[in-house]
Image (cartoon, rainbow, N blue to C red):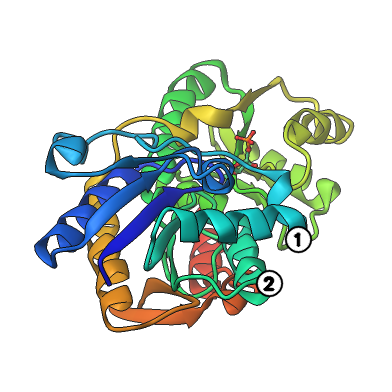
């Protein structure tokens, strides 16, 4: 193994740069040259790469976003696109590729590995949604969750001052990890997550009870699920049951930016090292992750086909503490 490639794909996540930096340093320490593939699968198909040396990754550990840039490329879902990517990997002379991204990235990588006899592929989970099977946490989740908690704290100040109900919508696509953990940490009253059916009538009743026993505010953390902006509709439906002044805040892409937290820098660093070491050990078609504090390699196919469950105990804790 002489030369490897690194790319980031799908939604950017804070801590991706820490991961790129760690992978590059580990590769250089093992006498491997590194190509930074630009703009995810778009750059892979186009063989668009820049050399990554020590200077290229200097002073990047604290930066959000991804210095390699990223994309969501529909061409990768066509066989023709994937065969072009396989040909580009060969043309670039890569003996292995580290792919940092989420379930969509690993879906694409699994299809690529099935279509063509490419160089070994090793994935690293990077997604604020945290919905990748095979790791307790994905790079970027902690930073995004802390952003949501800060937003809840700020909203609480104004909610309490006006005795208002707020709906705060967080990202997470089809998973409620961001909503659940930020809801616990922010002391939210209610949670709307895609993993559960919601009864607007019962939720309204609980909110009303809270005000009756002396609460001065209520915050409902809503996971965006398949319909970003869904909180406006939920607020309207609650209004039919409750005569309370309410407001809606949609956090959106705010959660994806900003400097990575300590946890995301450490996780990104650990997994960047692990990914290159996995390639050096001859592994392929897997994703490195951390489960229960231990490093794990999970087949790429499982990472997006298996559903990562919410932590039931955390869900139980939310219910106890929100009453
Ligand atoms: O997957 C990360 C994520 O931020 C989701 O939480 C969100 O639904 C989606 O990406 C937004 O995608 P885009 O940046 O393409 O609008």
Residue at x 50%, y 77% (from the top left corner): 285
What residue is disc 2 on? 115
The percent coordinates of residue 273 (x first, y second) are: 23, 65
The verdict on label 1 being within 8 Å of ligand 1 is: no
User: Can residue 252 be seen in the rendering of this structure?
Assistant: yes
How would you rate the neighbour count of disc 1 (Cα within 10 Å): few for under 14, some for 14-19, many for 20 or more? some
Q: Residue 267 location, x and y as percent?
A: 28, 59
Q: Quadrant of the N terminus?
A: bottom left
Q: Is residue 76 left or right of residue 292?
A: right
Of residues 114 and 274, the one drawn nearer to the viewer in this rendering: 114
Rendering coords of residue 177 (x, y %): 54, 57
The outermost residue toward the front is: 91
Is label 1 in contact with label 2 (beta carbons under 8 Å)?
Answer: yes
Alpha carbon separation for disc pair 1 and 2 = 7 Å
Q: Is 114 located above or below residue 129 in the figure?
A: below
Q: Secondary structure at mark 2?
A: helix
Q: Residue furthest right?
A: 240
For disc 1, the marked residue is 79
């Amino acid at each position: 193994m002489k030369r490897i490639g690194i790319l980031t794909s799908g939604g950017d996540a804070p801590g991706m740069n820490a991961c790129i930096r760690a992978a590059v340093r580990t590769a250089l320490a093992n006498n491997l040259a590194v190509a930074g593939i630009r703009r995810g699968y778009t750059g892979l198909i186009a063989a668009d790469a820049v050399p990554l040396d020590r200077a290229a990754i200097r002073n990047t550990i604290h930066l959000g976003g991804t210095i390699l840039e990223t994309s969501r490329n529909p061409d990768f879902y066509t066989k023709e696109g994937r065969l072009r990517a396989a040909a580009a990997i060969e043309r670039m002379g890569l003996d292995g590729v580290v792919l940092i991204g989420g379930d969509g990235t690993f879906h694409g990588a699994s299809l690529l590995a099935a279509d063509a006899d490419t160089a070994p592929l090793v994935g690293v989970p990077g997604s604020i949604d945290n919905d990748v099977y095979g790791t307790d946490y994905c790079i970027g989740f902690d930073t995004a969750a802390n952003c949501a908690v800060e937003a809840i704290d700020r909203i609480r100040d104004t909610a309490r001052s006006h005795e208002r109900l707020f709906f705060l919508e967080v990202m997470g696509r089809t998973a409620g990890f961001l909503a659940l953990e930020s809801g616990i940490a922010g002391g939210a009253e209610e949670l709307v997550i895609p993993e559960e059916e919601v009864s607007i009538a019962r939720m309204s009743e609980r909110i009303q009870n809270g005000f009756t026993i002396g609460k001065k505010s209520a915050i409902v953390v809503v996971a965006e699920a398949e319909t970003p902006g869904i909180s406006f509709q939920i607020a309207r439906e609650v209004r039919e049951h409750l005569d309370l002044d309410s407001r809606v805040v949609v956090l959106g892409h705010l959660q994806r930016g900003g400097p990575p937290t300590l946890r995301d820098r450490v996780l990104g660093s650990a997994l960047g090292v692990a990914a290159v070491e996995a390639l050096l050990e001859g592994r392929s078609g897997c994703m490195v992750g951390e489960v229960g504090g231990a490093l794990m390699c999970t087949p790429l196919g499982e990472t997006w086909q298996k559903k990562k469950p919410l932590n039931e105990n955390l869900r139980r804790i939310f219910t106890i503490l929100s009453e």
